[in-house]
Amino acid sequence: MTKPLQGISIQVPTDRRSFLKKGVLTAGTAMVGAGLVGDALPAFAKREDEKSGKLGKGDAAILRFLAAAEILETDLWQQYNELGGIQDNEVPGGSGSALYIAALQQLDGDMPQYIHDNTEDELTHEVFINAYLESKGADVVNLDKFRTLPSSKATGAQQIGRLTNLMQLSVDTTWWTRYRSRTKNPDFGDNFPQAVPTLAVGQHPAIPRSDADLGPSNHIQAIANTAGFHFGTIEQGGTSLYPSLAQRVSSVEVLRILLSIGPTEAMHFQTWHDKAGNAPPLTDPTDPTLIFPNLNASPFGGEDFQTNLIMPEPTVFLSHSLPACSIVRPTNTKGAARGALQFLTASNLFLGQSKEFFAYLLDLAEDADQAQRDRD
């Protein structure tokens, strides 16, 4: 899940904690979003100005990072739902785009319902975690001041400020090959080929940027295919993040929260793994560099790569001397929060955000990664 960043350097304010106090970290529930990254920064474990309330400092830091991550997911899923999902009182906003929905349904006829339900799930996660922090007297997260990125201009999208950018993505699709490998595990430093190599380079829209993107038919289908693979990319990250951070918490109740929310991310991932396999092979007529291959053909194909396989193949775990095991991968806890944010930043998901945005979110990640489980 972790990828090094090239050419990204964030200049952090001298006193980041004073910056945090100016309305970003607050004692009260709110909706927020998350992003990250930059050069190495010192640890903050000894700083006293964040309220942990009745929680240990490490547990509060982990929950704050997860609250931010869930708010990030809510922000991006809401954009997908406004144009491609079902709008109702559970997930309000937007009015849909018929041609985009039709292209998504080439991957599965139930896509609008699945997008709606994923959106609702992430919304409940962010609200619950922040409310739990507040109930314990701990500071919660509010990133409303960073909702500055533009919305799609396509008919059906709300015109409001966003935290995430779905219109210039570089989508990592190594999860497709990683979960089908019987001999490699990223926790051992192994690398994996891209399922859709051209999607991992350049900048590609996953939602129509305007009504001009609704044709020709293979162009809007390429946008829907991009979304289909991005869904899996996002949710495999959550699938790994929760067990990685769960290894650092001290409170049994906080552990219960992570072990209860984390499996829903795995349910999402398996759903989107299944749907991505149905993406029609094509070349985007408006961007001939973007090619969606037939994933049942060479260099993939065969027993381990047929597109209807969506359960993790057994692979090496903990030690090469132990038998292969079907597992979530990666789950190494070292640097898990920062690694997740590096991965998302490398995808251009936060393209256009401010240096303050990255400094704050890197601060959250550093705090979460400094958490240590109490031992008897």
Image: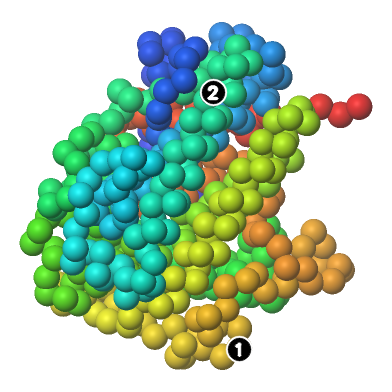
Residue farthest to the front, as pictured: 89
The residue type indicated by label 1 comes to Glu
The residue that appears at 71% across and 19% down in the rendered structure is: 56
The residue type indicated by label 2 comes to Ala
Residue 303's disc number = 1
Q: Quadrant of residue 215?
A: bottom left
Q: Please give left or right for residue 94 compared with residue 375 in the image.
A: left
Q: Please give left or right for residue 55 compared with residue 91 in the image.
A: right
The residue that appears at 59% across and 24% down in the rendered structure is: 132
The residue that appears at 55% across and 35% down in the rendered structure is: 66
Q: Position of residue 114 (x, y in %)?
A: 42, 59
Residue 166's disc number = none
SS of the residue under disc 1 = loop
Q: Earlier in the sequence, mark 1 or mark 2?
A: 2
Q: Quadrant of residue 305?
A: bottom right
Colour pattern of the rendering? rainbow
Residue farthest to the left, as pictured: 212
Check the picture and name the quadrant holding the C terminus: top right
Question: Disc 2 marks which residue?
Answer: 131
Q: Position of residue 283 (x, y in %)?
A: 24, 80
Q: Nearer the viewer, residue 325 or 107?
A: 107
